[in-house]
Image (cartoon, rainbow, N blue to C red):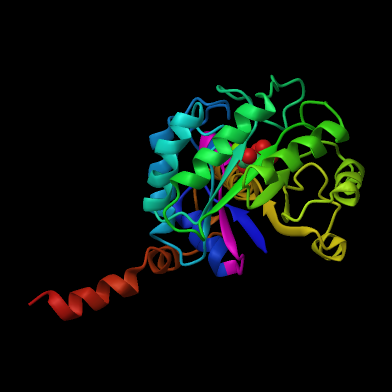
Amino acid sequence: MHAMSAHNPMAARLAADAGFDAIWGSGFELSASYAVPDASILSASQHLDMMRAIAATVDVPVIADIDTGFGNAINVSYMVPQYEAAGVSAVVMEDKTFPKDTSLRANGRQELVRVQEFQGKIEAACAARRDPDFCVIARTEALIAGLGQQEALDRAHAYEAAGADAILIHSKQNTPDEILSFIAAWQGRAPLVLVPTAYPQLRESDIQALGKVGLVIYGNHAIRAAVGAMRDVFARIRSDGGIHAVDADLPSVKEIIALQGDADMRELERRYLK
Ligand code: SPV
Ligand code: MG
């Protein structure tokens, strides 16, 4: 299963149309779309509202990145039902302290909570869900924090024992070695989840051959594509002295209107505007 990041419903619609199995409700992307760091700056309700809007737009499952769970196990108990009610199918919660710092930045503040404390947060998340098919994915940042493979394995096993449905193991090394070594050593039953942003050379076919990975998340490719495309087009318009040259290279206004769901609205018009 492959999930693509989205920071708004249009990105989610494009990802679903492209054939991704799920949407990753990335905290990094949403923070970037507000031009603020991915460091618990945005509020829980800002993220929750965006997840609700995305889930209302696409039919594929939405996997919400709830960072640290916005506090302790008590906060998790109150947040999970709200995400579930927003139409989300799964949450990913990481074992860092609140407020968090983003994972892929060099020299970020990567402090982890105690194993038992995070087990309590996982138990709280599992107990708070109403639909037993709602997935609670536990994410360990042990490799990101530089604590080594044994700490990552110990934490992953402890989180599985606490009830996590899957384990997200994150790495910021720019080769897949650290992740491949973790996967080889993983003895748990829970499927693993990877976010291969830092080691893009690991292809889907390589990951599938490993057998233990149930989900691959492409963590920030929507916002990076958007930033790259906007920057290029804006620069061209400035240097061309107008929009005459870029126009043909952009999606037409007609295409955007179609992506806005115009056909559905016209159907409502036909039926109900009397
Ligand atoms: C996100 O996309 O918000 C993630 C993945 O949590 S990462 O940014 O790589 O930590
Ligand atoms: Mg995140």
Residue found 83% across the figure and 63% down from its top: 211
Whether 21 is among the magenta residues is yes
From the viewer's side, name the closer residue of 67 and 197.
67
Give the x, y percent position of residue 190. 72, 54
Which residue is at the far bottom? 271
Instruction: Please give the count of numbered marks on the rendered protein.
Output: 0
Determine the image quadrant of residue 37.
top right
Residue found 41% across the figure and 61% down from its top: 57
View quadrant of ligand 1? top right
Determine the image quadrant of residue 177.
top right
The reply, left or right, for residue 155 in relation to residue 101 is right
Whether 27 is among the magenta residues is yes
Q: Which residues are magenta?
A: 18-31
Q: Where the C terminus falls, by quadrant? A: bottom left
Q: Compared with residue 270, is residue 78 higher up or lower down, i.e. above or below?
A: above
From the viewer's side, name the closer residue of 186 and 231.
186
On the question of residue 227 being in view, the answer is: yes
Give the x, y percent position of residue 205. 84, 66
The reply, left or right, for residue 216 in relation to residue 184 is left
Give the x, y percent position of residue 66. 53, 39
Residue found 60% across the figure and 67% down from its top: 18
Which residue is at the far front? 161
